[in-house]
Amino acid sequence: MGNYVANADALVDAVTRDAANDDSAHDMGGDIVPWFVERGTAGVYDFIDNDVPGSTDRDRNYWRDVGTIDAYFDANKDLISINPVFNLYNDEWPLYTGYTGLPPAKFVHAGPGRLGHAADSIVSPGVLVSGATVVGSVLSPGVHLHSWSSVSDSVLMDGVQVHRHAQVHRAILDKNVVVGARARIGLDPDADRARGFTVTASGITVVPKGTVVD
């Protein structure tokens, strides 16, 4: 993520000029900011000098450019390592986020072959793991995993539904994706591409928002 702070009138002027430039890619980081830099009207904050309260030498200078799918995926995986380099559990650096009103996450069913559980994962409020297996994944608010489904090494965004016996591996599922019973995502890259999904060179499958996967 990049954070930019600008005077409104200066930004409007720069964007207006850029819109009329046919040689511009009209990109904030690639065109607008360099335009300010060339005129000596831009400053920079060096996060190496950013001293987060409660941080250690290991996580003090954490920064990731998540401009690619692989980088975004890796940043999510950073959160679930045993000793996370991006530490959400630093009490001196609280998260000031909006209250969702969602209930706590719930894990149900404990019968043979049907155990709702998660390991090496982050599970958000409102998640229901119903007889499903979760390993090495990030589950966003409102995700619902049904019995005998499995999710591994994946990032599931808000409201994703994974139905019975479905399998999701090394994938990013955008908001409100519905994975049908016995559907498989991330296990056969060629099949994923044939369905129109993006598959990165490293093998991460991306399913767009609201897609129903049968």
Image (spheres, rainbow, N blue to C red):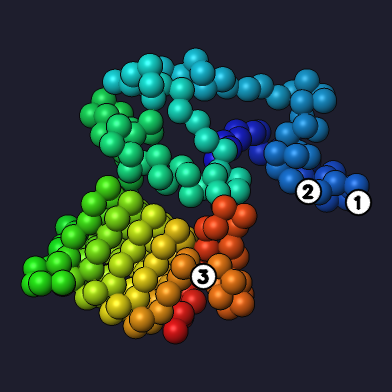
* Mark closer to the chain start, 3 or 1: 1
* Mark closer to the chain start, 3 or 2: 2
Establish if 177 lies above or below 91.
Answer: below
Under circle 1, the secondary element is loop
Residue 118: percent from the left, percent from the top?
Answer: 22, 56
Q: Residue at x 29, y 50 (%)?
A: 121
**Residue linked to disc 2:** 26
**Residue linked to disc 1:** 22
The answer to whether residue 134 is visible is: yes
Under circle 3, the secondary element is loop
Residue 188 tag number: 3
Q: Quadrant of the C terminus?
A: bottom left
Residue 165: percent from the left, percent from the top?
Answer: 30, 78
Q: Quadrant of the N terminus?
A: top right
In the figure, is residue 49 to the left or right of 199?
left
Spatial CA span between label 3 and label 2 = 37 Å
Q: Residue at x 40, y 45 (%)?
A: 77
Q: Are marks 2 and 1 in contact (CB under 8 Å)?
A: no
Establish if 162 lies above or below 173.
Answer: below
Question: Which amino acid lies under the numbered mark 1 shown in the image of this protein?
Answer: Asp
Residue 2 tag number: none
